[in-house]
Amino acid sequence: MPHTPAHGVPVRGGHPVHEEAGRPGPERYGPATGTLPVVPGPRRAPAAGTPAPPTAPAPAPVADGGEDGAGRSGKGKALTGIAAAAVTTCLAIVVAGQVADREEGVPAVRAAQQPAERASEDASASRSVERAAPSSPPPATRAPAPTYEQLMTRQFPIDPKLTGSGEFETVPGTDRAPGRGQKHRYRVDVEKGIGLDAALFARAVQQTLNDKRSWAGEGAMTFERISSGEADFVVTLASPGITAKWCAKSGLDTTVDNVSCDSASTERVMINAFRWAQGSETFGPKAMHAYRQMLINHEVGHRLGHNHVSCRTPGALAPVMQQQTKSLNIDGITCRPNPWVHPGS
């Protein structure tokens, strides 16, 4: 006898339908596999610059073929989900490993670069030190050039027996007569090769002759140095041997005491370079300036017409026309050295 639906299990399509507790049958989820589906863990964000992992392809759609197709579709969906989860998990692991490797590699790379960078910095510092200019001592302060007065106090080296070339050179330039009275034009010649300062000598002649204590002191005359044209006389600085030759032309012997002279038969007033450079014992090395002034005044005095005069008062200043280079004691009367015509002026 056929069963009635009131007392049996409803049948649909030849299969019993379970409605216990209102739950559908197991067919809705596919056959039991004995394992739970793998759920992927949280994905770690990739590090900056890391390429995004490839996206898993979506599962292909399954055609719905009724109750039998629904069962097969459910099983396929479950398998597809499991495969997708597995792929996602593997990708997450791979990406995490890559990120970890990248993050772990950064300190290593930095550690490897730091010595090179430090070496580069050290080398750069070393190069900068090597290229730095070495500190040099401050330049030595140049001593000021000696003044005319200082030069006139110095002695200069020269051979007392020197005989030079005998060639003369005129000191260039002019020095105008500064005073009144009769003007005397003179030239200054210096023998070549004797090693003495020609400009210093020319200046000494001009300043000495025009000093108020000299021949121009009373205003009766004045002296002007020229270097061209006609001169009244020529003040000449020459070696001892050449001085002797020019003085001999006027009958004077200067070799005995190596002295100077006015060679009256010529245009030259001869100043012995040895005496100009070294002075005399009567004045001493500390009075070189005064001795040179006396030497100029004495020999030019002869050219102006004055003869020798000796001191007559013991202890007095010797007359400028006394032969002071030879001695300050004449006939037992000793006087003091004096370079001037008018020493009290």
Image (tube, rainbow, N blue to C red):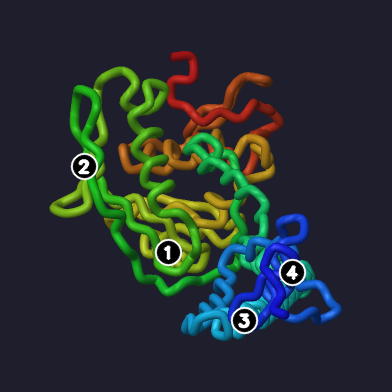
The residues tagged by marks 4 and 1 sit, at their Cα atoms, a distance apart of 179 Å
Badge 1 vs badge 3, beta-carbon distance below 8 Å: no
State the residue position of label 1. Answer: 248
Label 4 crowd bin: few (<14), some (14–19), many (20+), radius 10 Å: few
Q: Which amino acid, mark 3? A: Gly
Which residue in the protein does label 3 denote?
71
The quadrant of the rendering that contains the C terminus is: top left
Looking at the picture, does residue 240 appear above or below residue 227? below
Which mark is nearer the camera, 1 or 2? 2
Residue 265 horizontal/vertical position (percent): 30, 57
Does dot 4 land on a helix, a strand or a loop?
Answer: loop
Which residue is labeled 4 in the image? 8
How far apart are the alpha carbons under marks 1 and 3?
157 Å
Label placed on residue 185: 2
Crowd around label 3: few <14 · some 14–19 · many ≥20 (10 Å): some
**Position of residue 311 in the picture relative to residue 118 (left or right):** left
